[in-house]
Every structure is written in structure tokens, then in C-alpha cells.
Image (tube, coloured by chain):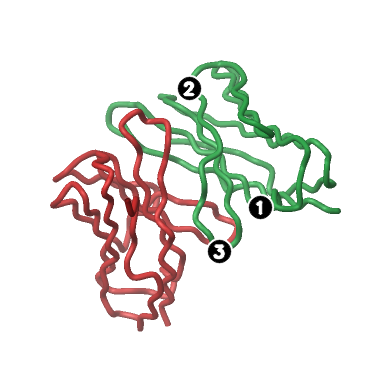
């Protein structure tokens, strides 16, 4: 199965930079996702990494190291609307569990003015 | 283009009652998932399907059954609802490239 760990809560101030870490253990890694979820809403897609390295998309960047089982989501120029839960998810490719998608418990980010 | 549609959005059940949640997608995706989300627990995988006619158990399958008779629909059934099944349920699909997960809007279920 999967073991995905993220910090439970983080706080930061408007305009700052914050890094949310995610570590995982899997027997068959096949991609890592980051999602944003506001209270009472469905998660929305932020990024996907399957190869090592940094993927940049506007104010958001995501990094992956498969050998270390580690990823982070970097949010720059924080805005109040970035206050949300950030979910890390890993896709399994092992034969009997091909296609499984596991989520971490999420990191609740609060952005202060 | 509706994407992923879940019905119903809200439901209150009495203990022991049965119900079915419907997830419908119009994107022709093979992979579909049912998750439940509880405070502090994140999204936990209940069951999933890698194609029409196939289903598989996730992390928390007990008390639930699923069916995927048609590619576009993934049904989640509660045969005898329990208060522990009070939760928000999300359906999701994975696109053919495997790099984007699409979610439904969620179904809020309360079992009293």
C-alpha cells in the first residue's frame, strides 16, 4: 500500500513563500499529484510530477525526487485566497493495485494579512 | 460538458437504510474512484474501477459495494447505513494520460 505524510497545518503571511512537503512510500510509483481544496468544495488540480525535477506553473511549483520518496509544493507571492488544504496524492502502478490513487491527509494552510 | 456529476448532493439516512450514490462522467475515462473525506482524515479510497465491468477494493471498502456496468457510470451502494458512514463522498476520474484527476462536486451523507 501507500504511506503518505504531510504536515497537518502551516501558516504564512501574505506575499511570502511557503513550501509544503510530502513524503511517500510505495512499491510501485507512477506519478504524484498536488491538489488544492477550499472548505466545502471539491479538490482542484495544481500539478503532476512523474519524473524527478521541478515543474513550474505561475506562482506554484512542484518538485519530485523519486529516489527519496519526496515532493514539495512551493507557493510564491502568497495571497489570502491561497488559504486552503493542499493534498498530495500518489498513483500506484503495481500489478494488483494498478491505478490506485492514494491521498495524504492534507496540509491546512492559513495565510495572514 | 458536465465532467463528473454526482447525485444526490445531500442525503440524510436512517441507520439500516440503503442508498446508492451515482457518479456519471462524460469524458470517456477508464479509471473511476470513490473516496470518503472525514475531518482530519484526508481522502480515503473506498473502491475503484479500471474499466467497464471491473471493480476493486481500496483502503476502506467495508460496508460499501460498487458497480460499473456502463463505462460512464460508477455506483456506490450502502446496503445498511451506519452512523460511521456519515461523510462527504467524492467521485473522481483519471484521464487517459494519467496526469489529471477530475473530481465531482461531492455528496454530503448523514446517517442518523
* Between discs 1 and 2, the one toward the N terminus: 2
Rate crowding at label 3 as few (under 14), some (14 to 19) or many (20 or more) other CA atoms within 10 Å: few
Q: Chain of mark 1?
A: A
Does residue A39 sit above or below B9 in this rendering?
Answer: above
Q: Chain of mark 2?
A: A
Colour of the chain lettered B: red
Quarter of the image where the C terminus of chain B is located: bottom left
Rate crowding at label 2 as few (under 14), some (14 to 19) or many (20 or more) other CA atoms within 10 Å: some
Q: Is residue B52 left or right of residue A90?
A: left
Q: Position of residue A101 (x, y in %)?
A: 41, 39
Check if mark 2 and mark 3 are on a common chain: yes
Q: Can you identify the residue that label 3 sits on?
A: A40
Q: Can you identify the residue that label 1 sits on?
A: A84
* Between discs 3 and 1, the one toward the N terminus: 3
Disc 3 and disc 1: Cα gap in Å?
A: 11 Å
Does residue A26 sit above or below B103 in this rendering?
Answer: above
Total numbered labels: 3
Secondary structure category for the residue under label 1: strand
Secondary structure category for the residue under label 2: loop
Q: Position of residue B25 (x, y in %)?
A: 28, 51
Q: Chain of mark 3?
A: A
Does residue A110 sit above or below A103 in this rendering?
Answer: below
Q: Is residue A87 left or right of residue A1?
A: right
Check if mark 1 and mark 2 are on a common chain: yes
Which residue sits at x=41%, y=68%?
A: B85
Q: Nearer the viewer, residue A34 or A21?
A: A34
Mark 1 in CB contact with mark 2 (< 8 angstroms): no
Q: Nearer the viewer, residue B48 or A16?
A: A16
Amino acid at each position: 500500500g501507500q504511506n503518505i505524510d504531510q504536515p497537518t497545518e502551516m501558516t504564512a503571511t501574505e506575499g511570502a513563500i511557503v513550501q509544503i512537503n510530502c513524503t511517500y512510500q510505495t512499491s510501485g510509483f507512477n506519478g504524484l499529484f498536488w491538489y488544492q481544496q477550499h472548505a466545502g468544495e471539491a479538490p482542484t488540480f495544481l500539478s503532476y510530477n512523474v519524473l524527478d525535477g521541478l515543474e513550474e506553473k505561475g506562482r506554484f511549483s512542484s518538485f519530485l525526487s523519486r529516489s527519496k520518496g519526496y515532493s514539495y509544493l512551493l507557493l510564491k507571492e502568497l495571497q489570502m485566497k491561497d488559504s486552503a488544504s493542499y493534498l498530495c496524492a500518489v498513483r500506484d502502478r503495481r500489478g494488483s493495485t494498478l491505478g490506485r490513487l492514494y491521498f495524504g491527509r492534507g496540509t491546512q494552510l492559513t495565510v495572514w494579512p | 460538458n458536465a465532467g463528473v456529476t454526482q447525485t444526490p448532493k445531500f442525503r440524510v439516512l436512517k441507520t439500516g437504510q440503503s442508498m446508492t450514490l451515482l457518479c456519471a462522467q462524460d469524458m470517456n475515462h477508464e479509471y473511476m474512484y470513490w473516496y470518503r473525506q472525514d475531518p482530519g482524515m484526508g481522502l480515503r479510497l473506498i473502491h475503484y474501477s479500471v474499466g467497464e465491468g471491473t471493480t476493486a477494493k481500496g483502503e476502506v471498502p467495508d460496508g460499501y459495494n460498487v458497480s460499473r456496468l456502463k463505462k460512464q457510470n460508477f455506483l456506490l451502494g450502502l446496503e445498511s447505513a451506519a452512523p460511521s458512514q456519515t461523510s462527504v463522498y467524492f467521485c473522481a476520474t483519471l484521464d487517459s494520460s494519467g496526469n489529471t484527476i477530475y473530481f465531482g462536486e461531492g455528496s454530503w451523507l448523514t446517517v442518523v
